Image (cartoon, grey):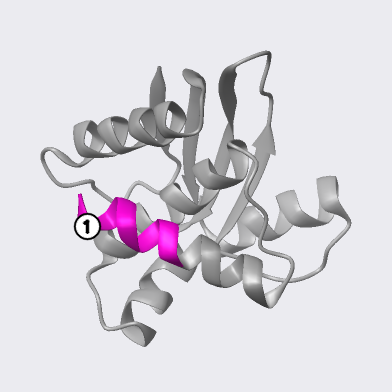
C-alpha cells in the first residue's frame, strides 16, 4: 500500500497523481521480483529534509529525496522523504512540470528500494534510463 503525506499545506497533488504513482510503484516491484509492502511518501520542505539528512545520515546538505528501506523478504517497503523545494527547483532546471519531476523522484526512490544504486557514473546512467522508462508508461 502506498501512502502520501503532504507536510507542506501549500502543495496539492493533481487528480489522478496518486493512482498513477501507485501503478508505477507496483510495476517497479513486479519487474524486479517483489511485491509492494507499505511505502510512505512524505513531502516536506528543504529545511525539514535537511533535518532528516543531518539527524539520520549525518549529512549537512540539501537533497531531493532520502529513502529509508524497510524491505522484508520479497516485499518492498520504505519511507521516501521528498523535498518539495528541490522538486520545484529541479523542474525549472530540467524544463518539466513539478509533478513530472515529483514522479521521477518517487520512481528513483523505489528503484533504490528494489536494489538499484547510483554511486557510479554507469549506475547513474542505468538509474536515469529506468526512471525514463517508468515515466514513459
Please tell me whether residue 108 is drawn above or below residue 2 in the rendered image: below
- For the residue pair 111 and 70, the one nearer the viewer reads as 111
Quarter occupied by the N terminus: top left
- For the residue pair 31 and 119, the one nearer the viewer reads as 31
SS class of the residue under badge 1?
Answer: helix
Q: Position of residue 2 (x, y in %)?
A: 40, 24
Question: Disc 1 designates what residue?
Answer: 136
User: Is 73 situated left or right of 29 in this image?
Assistant: right
Q: Residues within 10 Å of mark 1 (few under 14, many from 20)?
A: few
Please tell me whether residue 12 is drawn above or below residue 94 in the rendered image: above
Magenta-drawn stretch, dominant element (helix, strand or loop): helix
Which residue is situated farthest in the left direction here?
15
Q: Position of residue 19 (x, y in %)?
A: 21, 31
How many numbered marks appear?
A: 1
Which residue is situated farthest in the right direction here?
58
Please tell me whether residue 77 is drawn above or below residue 56 in the rendered image: above
Give me the residue at 55% from left, 41% from top. Answer: 80
Give me the residue at 50% from left, 29% from top. Answer: 40
Give me the residue at 66% from left, 23% from top. Answer: 71
Q: Position of residue 9 (x, y in %)?
A: 34, 46
User: Is 45 situated left or right of 74 in this image?
Assistant: left
Give me the residue at 45% from left, 42% from top. Answer: 7
Q: Is residue 17 magenta?
A: no
In the image, which residues are magenta? Answer: 129-137
User: Is 12 situated left or right of 123 in this image?
Assistant: left
Please tell me whether residue 72 is drawn above or below residue 118 in the rendered image: above
Amino acid at each position: 500500500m502506498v501512502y502520501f503525506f503532504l507536510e507542506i499545506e501549500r502543495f496539492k497533488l493533481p487528480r489522478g497523481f496518486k493512482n498513477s504513482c501507485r501503478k508505477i510503484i507496483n510495476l517497479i516491484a513486479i519487474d524486479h521480483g517483489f511485491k509492494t509492502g507499505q511505502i510512505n511518501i512524505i513531502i516536506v520542505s528543504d529545511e525539514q529534509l535537511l533535518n532528516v539528512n543531518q539527524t539520520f545520515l549525518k549529512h549537512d546538505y540539501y537533497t531531493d529525496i532520502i529513502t529509508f528501506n524497510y524491505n522484508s523478504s520479497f516485499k518492498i517497503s520504505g519511507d521516501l522523504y521528498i523535498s518539495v523545494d528541490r522538486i520545484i527547483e529541479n523542474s525549472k532546471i530540467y524544463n518539466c512540470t513539478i509533478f513530472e519531476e515529483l514522479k521521477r523522484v518517487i520512481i528513483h526512490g523505489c528503484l533504490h528500494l528494489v536494489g538499484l544504486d547510483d554511486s557510479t557514473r554507469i549506475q547513474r546512467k542505468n538509474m536515469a534510463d529506468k526512471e525514463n522508462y517508468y515515466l514513459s508508461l
